[in-house]
Image (cartoon, grey):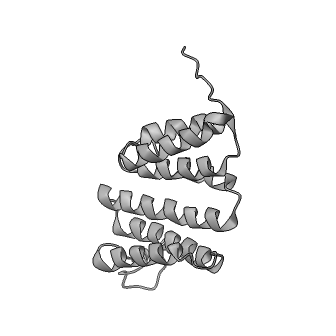
Amino acid sequence: MVELKAISKQAIPSALAKAQRYRLLNDPQNAESICRDVLRADSNNQEALVLLLLTLTDQFGKDLRVAVHHAQEVLPRIEDEYERTYHGGVICERWAKAQLARGAPGYAVYDWFCRALDAYEQAQAGSPPGNDDAILRWNACARIMKRNEQIRPKPQDQSIEAGFEDEVPYR
């Protein structure tokens, strides 16, 4: 088996810049790999954790081996409460979009968008002055939900007894 090589702590800033470039080039797998290398050298590097989370969400719907729980596992390691809450919303929003593209039922997509909206509202409450990122993301989700008629709550299940003429309960 091939062993991974470690990068030096001095190489971290340059490595993170490369990871950002790979994300911009729509190559999240390479960006993810770099983030993991940085985290091997500095396990608590907050910039690398946020970038790793984003690279994982970039892969939603494109790489079936990357699921929502992979990004959610990174979330608790983000120390700043605002960043953790905001990026929790990003995870839900991007998963909702991936599920929508995949043709998932509208009510499932709706639930994920609602989770994103809740996270963005919480993040907005704790956002630094002049930072309206959570509002911008909230509005983007709301617009998607308004434009797409299939994104609706799950209809209330009718009782199993509905439709029976007599008053004898179904067993």
The total number of labels drawn is 0
Q: Residue placed at 50% from the left, 69% from the top?
A: 116
The spot of residue 156 in percent (x, y) is 43, 78
Q: Residue placed at 51% from the left, 45% from the top?
A: 17
Q: Nearer the viewer, residue 137 or 25?
A: 25
Q: Nearer the viewer, residue 153 or 61?
A: 61
Residue 112 falls left or right of residue 119:
left
Is residue 56 visible from the viewing direction of this image?
Answer: yes
The spot of residue 64 in percent (x, y) is 39, 42
Residue 70 falls left or right of residue 100:
right
Quadrant housing the N terminus? top right
Is residue 158 visible from the viewing direction of this image?
Answer: no
Q: Residue placed at 53% from the left, 66% from the top?
A: 89
From what the image shows, is residue 50 above or below residue 19? below
The spot of residue 75 in percent (x, y) is 62, 55
In the current view of this chain or complex, which residue is farthest to the top? 1
Q: Residue placed at 46% from the left, 72% from the top?
A: 137
Q: Nearer the viewer, residue 55 or 76?
A: 55
From what the image shows, is residue 79 above or below residue 164? above
The spot of residue 55 in percent (x, y) is 47, 48
